[in-house]
Amino acid sequence: MATASAGAVPAGTPHLKRTLTLWDLILYGVIVIQPVAPMSAFGVLYVAGRGHVVTTILIAMVAMLFTAISYGRMARAYPSAGSAFTYVGQEINPALGYVTGWSMVMDYMLNPMICIIWLSEQSHDYVQAIPYWAWAIFFGIVFTALNVQGIKINARVNAVLAAAMGAVIVIFLVAALHFILGSPHDGLAFFTLPFYDPSTFNASAVLGGTSIAVLTYIGFDGISTLSEEAKDPRRNILYATVLTCLVIGILSAVEVYVAQLAWPLHQVFPNTDTAFTYVAQHVWPPLFIVLGLTLIVANFGSGMGAQIGAARLLFGMGRSDALPKSFFGVVSAKHRIPRNNVVFVGAVALAGAFVLPAISGAAMTGYGLGASLLNFGALIAFMGVNAAAFVRYFLREETKRFWNFAPPVLGFIICGVLWWNLTTQARILGAVWMVVGIAFGAWKTRGFKGDLVNFDVPPDAA
């Protein structure tokens, strides 16, 4: 495992300028997660939770709030290495840190995969003459081609896109509320159904939906990587991480609440993966195109970023000889990016865009299975961060404080419950991935006695 120093920076050492305020950090977190986060997974959550999307979003928010506290506190100890695997490896055990890191590899590899699946489904809804497989090949090639060229979206463009997404959300909410209030309904009880529908409620189904709803919050941990650029990082990183989860959770709950009220009760969606765009069309037909294109832009940017992130992670493994260095540890001299890895991740993502829908079965779509698998790894990492925070701030402290005990323990338990309530198929496939990784790590380190893999993602070379 890579080590990280929490000590002071030696005098004369170049360092980043501390300019980011608390609100800058929150804005960054919201942009990374995206204000339209729950829309892509809305249909999958609706089916999995039997119509209780709002409830799944809010329960997931509680779990993420406790985990966010742990992330924020661990960022104090490791201000330059905001990674779950570093926290676990340094605070608990290097072998467990390796296991946490391997679970994160699954996340990185699956993120571009589910983006390709969603983009292909939505594009096929728009232009049905072009089949899903053709759209998947198109997006897989475009992602890879742009990333190989080292093309990335400017931070200012990200801010503009976030503002545009916000405007579209407002338009949708206004149109949906106008539609809902102008339609007949069964009194006040109608407005509580998204929280609790006695005809469909099932605790196991809601927990299963919640385990997928965690996807809405994926990315909040990225705030911890800005510790060296934040003003008063010991305070603001923690507050920003928690407040970002709170803002995204409330905004997401409002979006899906209004969407559920607008859609006819228990009516099947034409396409589960792109359900939110059909809700938008139902409340105001022009929104089918407007909101759909907004989600395409959001998923396109997310998919591109996820692919280069996965490529950098593999580069970190390659340069440390955990993977063949001659392939994975090479950087393109022209574009200064790990080109081989970009192509490799692109090929895996494209293959997955065909395999996941084929093996998902009737109960879940390919996107839903991919999201569940992604959360399989994410929830393991979140449990690891909570465990690391518990060890550092409770077990190792002479004074035992309730504040140091409750958040990490509750965060660990809730994440553990959600992890167990992932679909059986996701848990089996995820377990296979973990067994392969653990076996590889044990072989590489002679029973975890040698040096472990450096999972730190290299800084951007651009």
Image (cartoon, helix red, strand yellow):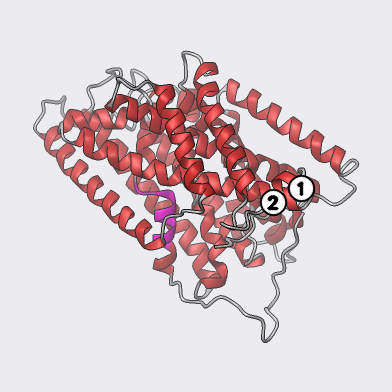
Residue 461 as seen in the image, left or right of residue 261: right
Tell me which residue sits at (64%, 44%) in the image. Answer: 340
User: 65 and 196: which one is in front?
Assistant: 65
Tell me which residue sits at (63%, 44%) in the image. Answer: 341
Q: Earlier in the sequence, mark 2 or mark 1?
A: 1
Q: Picture coordinates of residue 346 (x, y %)?
A: 55, 37
Disc 2 element: loop
Q: What residue is shown with label 2? A: 330
Q: CA distance from mark 2 to mark 1?
A: 7 Å
Q: Mainly helix, strand or loop, the magenta region?
A: helix
Residue 375 to residue 270: above or below: below
* Residue range (magenta): 26-35
User: 196 and 243: which one is in front?
Assistant: 243
Query: Hey, which quadrant is residue 224 in on the image?
Result: bottom right
Q: What residue is shown with label 1? A: 325
For residue 76: magenta? no
Disc 1 element: helix
Tell me which residue sits at (48%, 35%) in the image. Answer: 140
Q: Picture coordinates of residue 12 (x, y %)?
A: 67, 86
